[in-house]
Amino acid sequence: MPDRIAHAVFGLLFETSTDAAFIVDRSTGRVVSANVRAADLLARERDSLIGLTLADLAFEERDLAAPGRYEDVGLRRGDDYPIYVELQIAHVEDPEYGALAAYMARDKTERRGLERELVANHTALFTAYADLEKAHAQLGETKQELETRNAEIALLAWRAAMGELVAGIAHHLNNPVGALSSTTTRLVVLVSKLPPEHRSELERLLARVSQISRRIESNVAAIVRASRANAIDDVAHRPELPPELEQVLSTFAERLDDIPTKEQS
């Protein structure tokens, strides 16, 4: 009887179709016929399908009574493994067998798996892209911080170099100023021994020279204090100067050492 019902509904398509086909009695909801492909798809004996309900075959609860096309319908295999099919349902009124429902199921399990894998890969790619953007933003921030830090170090190095330069200049200025002060003091002693009529003009000139000498000494001392204020006193944290600047400062200092003082001349 099942084969007669199948042939009455499907004709030759029932046996030759590559899709799983089975017929359900709409009044009872039970399978009354199934083709070989349906048995293979559900990993069951063909005869064991007869009498089962849609609830027995469905992997998930879903209303499959109305005719139409259904996507991603989960069916339960004999080994309790889920498969997913595209299901076409048609209602048939047969004068001999009554109200029937014809089901054509096409296996989409592999395709569904590939689609899910594609979605997972897309999600992973999107997440990786978001992580890459975040890393790029962090890299930009780190670069900005590094540039700011380098600018600060360059400024500190420049201040330290200028402090050393000014201190070197002040040191070399102190030598002739000290010699001038010493000479002026000696001249004051010598002038004090002259007759009063010869001392007046000389004492006035020496006083003027002493005043100028003290002013120079005061200015040099102010330069030294300023250079020390701008220099970095902690040697452990002093930034290393660029080789070019070190060479310039060394060359400048060597040339200052070669300038003769009054004592040398």
Image (spheres, rainbow, N blue to C red):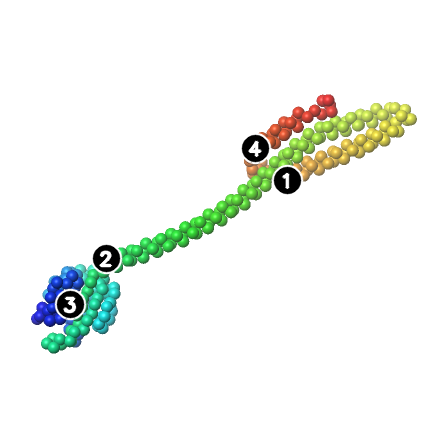
Q: Circle 2 — which element?
A: helix
Q: First in sequence: mark 4 or mark 2?
A: 2
The location of residue 88, given as percent across then percent down, is 21, 67
Within 10 angstroms of label 1, few (less than 14), some, or many (20 or more) residues? some
Q: First in sequence: mark 3 or mark 4?
A: 3
Indicate the amino acid at tag 4.
Glu
The location of residue 136, given as percent across then percent down, is 44, 49
Q: Which mark is residue 110?
A: 2
Q: First in sequence: mark 1 or mark 2?
A: 2
Q: Nearer the viewer, mark 1 or mark 2?
A: 2
Q: Nearer the viewer, mark 4 or mark 1?
A: 4
Residues at marks 1 and 2 touching, judged by CB atoms closer than 8 Å: no
Identify the residue position indicated by label 1 in the image: 230
Among all residues in the image, which is located at the extreme top?
265
From mark 3 to mark 1, how far is it between C-alphas?
A: 95 Å
Residues at marks 3 and 2 touching, judged by CB atoms closer than 8 Å: no
